[in-house]
Amino acid sequence: MSSDWETLQNRSFLESNARARAIGLADPGTFTELAGPRCRLSSPHLPLLGEAVEFDDGIVTGVGRHGSRPLFIASQEGRFVGGSVGEVHGAKLVNIVRMAHQAYDRMLAETPELPEERRPAVVISFETGGVRLHEANAGLLAHAELMDQFQDCKGKVPVIGIIGGRVGCFGGMGFVAAATDAIIMSPFGRLGLTGPEVIEEEMGKDEFDASDRALVYRVTGGKHKYIMGDCNLLVEDTIAAFRQGLGKVLAMSYAEIDRLRRIGSLDKVKAQLRTLAALVEIAPRDSRDVWTFAGNPAAETLVDMKLDDFLRTVKRLENAS
Amino acid sequence: MENLIGQGRLAIDMIVDPDSFREGVVGTLQLTDEEFGPGAVVGTASLDGAICTIIANDAMTINQKFPVVYAGIIGLEEGYKMALAVYHSIEADRDRAPGEKRALVLIVDTPGNGAGKLEEMAGMNKATGAYQMALAEARKAGHPIVAIVVGRAISGGFLCHGLQADHVLSLSAAFNTMIHVMPLTSIARITRLDIEWLQELAKSNPVFAAGPDFFYRLGGVEELVDSIPAMRDRVIAHIAEVRALKAAGREDQLGPWGRGTLGEVRGGRTVRGRVMQTMNEEFAKVADRYLK
Amino acid sequence: MSKKQWESRKADYQARMNAAAPYIHAGKVVAAADTTRVLEAVIRPFDRVNIEGNNQKQADFLAESLIKCDLEQVHDLHMVQSAVPLPVHLDMFEVGIAKKLDFAYGGPMGARVAEAIKHGKLELGAIHTYLELFARYFIDLTPRVSLVCAYEGDASGNLYTGFNTEDTPAIAEATKFRQGIVIAQVNKLVDKVSRVDIPGDWVDIVIESPKPFFLEPLFTRDPANITDTQVLMAMMAIKGIYGEYGVKRLNHGIGFNTAAIELLLPTYGEELGLKGKICTEFALNPHPTMIPAIESGWVESIHSFGGELGMQKYCEARGDVFFLGPDGTMRSNRAFSQTAGHYACDMFIGGTLQIDRFGNSSTATASRVAGFGGAPNMGCDAKGRRHPTEAWLKCGAEFTSQSEYLGNMPRGKRLVVQMVETFGEKMVPTFVDELDAWKLAQNANLALPPVMIYADDLTHILTEEGIAFLHKCGSLEERMAAIRGIAGFTEVGLAAKPAETRTLRDKGIIRTPDDLGIDRMRANRSLLAAKNISELVEWSGGLYDPPARFRNW
Amino acid sequence: MAKKLRELTFELKAESPSALPTDFLHYGVVGSGDMEVIMEHQELAGAVRIIVRTPVAGFDEVWRRVLERFVNQTGMADARIEINDNNATPVVVTLRLHQALAEIAEGGARHV
């Protein structure tokens, strides 16, 4: 088993499926899937609309270990209905987060002096466009439940978001991801709220051409989010790199992890408002204007720069750390 | 009066004690810039004699700095502005006993979040997320939060402004209230299914259909209110109910989680519980391996 | 009896140019704003007019200006042009500026061509291949006025067409030397062009267009969209055909199947020890998916029909492989590259939409006149070829029915390979009893069904089920059985008799992946030398600059 | 138009049967043009029961032929196979079924 795990590590995160990512993010051989394909908990709603189903409803949930921590893992499968959140999918995601803070409570009850490095952690690999249209209402309500569960994790369990799949992380899941403590992306990851097509519809093709993927990535891609401070770590496209990123975050104290968050307190909201005011001031036509503003005079070179060079040279916005 | 769509400010007046609403003021927060997030109306009022925070939409404004933010859309400034109001409510009552925290009343009439290039560049997801996180924190700190849909509660807009409340009320469909992710016509277009067939299907399965009735059956709305004048009383009553449940330590019956349970009771979301139970049972078998 | 006038063309040319003279300044320059007026001055009703454009670069500004002409002055033109891929090309027929069309490639406008014919708006001359159409420019379809495009032009009319030279020399030569008029839109008016691709003497008018000409990245295939099935078929192609025949000089079609082959050369091809033995010379556009093979030292030389958006710098930096001018930039040339593809390549391999039970194939559907482009010139046996190569001789030696015409005289044969999955997207079968081309011929009033590659030219069909070596068959019946044997679960395939297929396998006429010793389990994307556009950029050392719509970072 | 996910059931028997070498196996992702499969041991007197859930109508006979060939090629017996399909072509179906079996041989190493 561990030799399989080794081969997974060097694999492209982008190319891998949700299950491979989940297995590879945990310590070797420690991943146990919960409500996996064997349970055949596929969507009861999709068949009514004539749509294909998947035994795991497009999300792999389970538990593994990260060093001394129990690691509660959710990994969305972008290839199944765009990783969208339906009733089953949503319930699995909500419950894995809930299980993590309940596990914390149990561990704390058993070991009142529970050291920080033994606390459970949650890692979610987001690859989703948000709500699944075919069961939209149930999907929507699950989003609200997730935000609620995140709040229950606060002060107890670190929640880490990972974005490196083809679909990116959009729609309601965009703000769910924003509400995690730390976000790790690869340059191929995308994070946003509104998908490019809808923006084009709202603003017109001249203002935003959804087929211009370079533009889409400049606005929502990993490098931009890193400069903005909207993702904390930018890593190469391998499962190992994401796992190392995860390790970096989980090596921090809870207080340090808490500081990684972009939102979630009055001070953080105030800081965001300051950044926003500055952006309004420079009225960027393109993200490159933001990069220049952040202190990168040769902004146009950043896009094609190799990741290590990028990380070495890039200047981030002031709030970004 | 037929409905309250686009009339968030009027709805505030109809719900709170007469002439008690002070806009822009929440605890130590004093907002004076009229151009700052004009689509979000925040302030303090008294409701049945008790102080409360009001957060509402104003659909009659346009945010001059953000061309895609109009008609009640929650943009970047609006989202953060709403979050400020929540945090200042928490701050103001920090030293009060849990049972005495002020209520937050969310008056909902929004078609969604700002969908623009600058929005995505700056991170619209953070602004709407920030507000929801603030609400969740306030709710868990003991503030009763009651939302009432008076007009539109569309998709991400409803998640942002409404679904983090302890209880969600809605004027019934008779008042043209709209609660949905996407209208059925759009779903029909995208799924290439006949609208008649979808309407028929929706009768037995509320998970994709549009309208407050379906959300009621899914447990997404606690109560449908069938008259505009009754809104005030029902909000007051729900605040009291929420307070009582909190005092009794029954938070599990409130907020998104409570609505999850309600969805099962009302028969609208029956799989959710089974999925969670399966996971819990499977984990119980291996938990010692991970938690010890 | 009046004296025969031998210079009427020259006089006509002079009259037209005189009409245009008021707009021409500083040598041969016309302002963009005067373009339509100039076209009205030099074009007469019923003229044969060429608007340059193929599947890549487009003289789009001149096309947009032509359609604005006064219908009283300009109407019923006979358009002779390689391709009609822009909406404006068809609008021209809708409004009456143009009436008749001789062309080679319909592309995205295929459906509108069929419609326009049906409604009597468009009178179709014929659908050609590129070379065939170029040939007719010099016989009976010589343009009176040609509207071409270039990167740079100067006041004397010199043009720099560089990387995207494509059709321009053929059009300009045919037009100019029959006293026709050549008008060029250029991206930039310059004092001195980077290199003279078209001499100034051949060009009458130069116009700086308000924006650069449209360029379609038609040959860019994102490796991210290559499927495991395509990887399997690419393995079969490399081992079962390329390796088997030692195919060194070839042309690849445009689809994902051949992109998969290109990306498997440095991995699977290397593993089979085929480097240096296959794929050394190409007539091919600068496919981005060729980068890993080029970088790994597989490729000696590539001559290109046209350029490919984003590949310019890469090609310039790989001067040992691509054809560069003294200025250091690449030059493509469709006429020469098509000729090379026809005479100097040992193999053509590409995809198609439909293959009938006899082996005829077509990309036409009942309602789309897709046209032919260049594939038939490469997807046929070059009857005029005389020089031998190993692959050509081997294929000829295997060609069973050759002796029925030649007796004991040996002759080579080009490998013409159709590489298709038995079902396309949404379970549309590739193998059919009768091509939709028959219905199209009826619907669009064509003299004969448009066939891309005729069965008598086809030597191999490769599907996921196996390779059929059709040229080895002794009869039509045997060929049909071979086709059934690799047509999988389509209606055509279900008619196969297992015993018959077994016999064909024993005779080596059908070879399955098992027969070829290919492990299906290895057929997955991890074999691709690059799995996405970003990895192609990496292979190129940052020289490849992919178009915006192909970026995923 | 009402459309529903279709469920097809096939009961097949290999010409030279041998038992499925595992109790349970899951393989694949239901992407567009793709499928997933569960194979598990079940006493069926040497037969294989295959359930296919597919949005596509009109190819029941093709499914039967594809599955028959797979069962005969592999000699699979006493197994229950469940397939969730989303427009997979016969070649993809065949490829995934064989890859799934190879997964057993390799002890679950792939996760492609």
Image: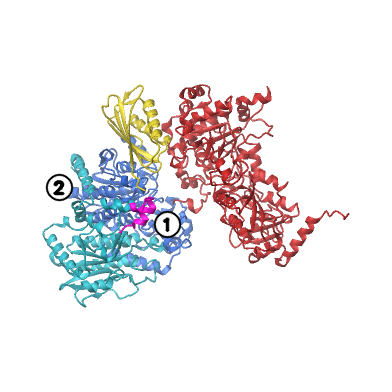
Chain colours: A blue, B cyan, C red, D yellow
Instruction: Residue type at mark 1: give it.
Output: Glu
Q: Position of residue C454 (x, y in %)?
A: 60, 35
Q: Is residue B151 visible?
A: yes
Query: Quick one: SS at disc 1?
Result: helix
Which image quadrant for residue B131?
bottom left
Range shown magenta = B180-196
Instruction: Residue type at mark 2: give it.
Output: Thr
Which image quadrant for residue C204?
bottom right
Task: Judge by depth and name the residue closer to the eye, C330 or B67.
Answer: B67
* Among the two numbered marks 2 and 1 on one chain, the one whose residue lies closer to the N terminus: 2
The residue at which mark 2 appears reads as A111
**Disc marking residue C159:** none
Q: Position of residue D42 (x, y in %)?
A: 26, 29
**Disc marking residue A197:** 1
Task: Judge by depth and name the residue closer to the eye, A286 or B68.
Answer: B68
Q: Position of residue D46 (x, y in %)?
A: 29, 24
- The 10 Å Cα crowd at callout 1, few under 14, some 14 to 19, many 20 or more, is some
* Nearer to us: label 2 or label 1: 1
Question: What subunit carries mark 1?
Answer: A
Task: Judge by depth and name the residue closer to the eye, C527 or B273.
Answer: B273
Q: Position of residue C408 (x, y in %)?
A: 68, 22
For the N terminus of chain B, give its image quadrant.
Answer: bottom left
**Residue C268 in the image: above or below residue C185:** above
Please state if A124 lies on the left or on the right of D56 as rendered: left
For the C terminus of chain B, give its image quadrant.
Answer: top left
The answer to whether residue B193 is magenta is yes
The answer to whether residue A93 is magenta is no
Q: Is residue A294 visible?
A: no
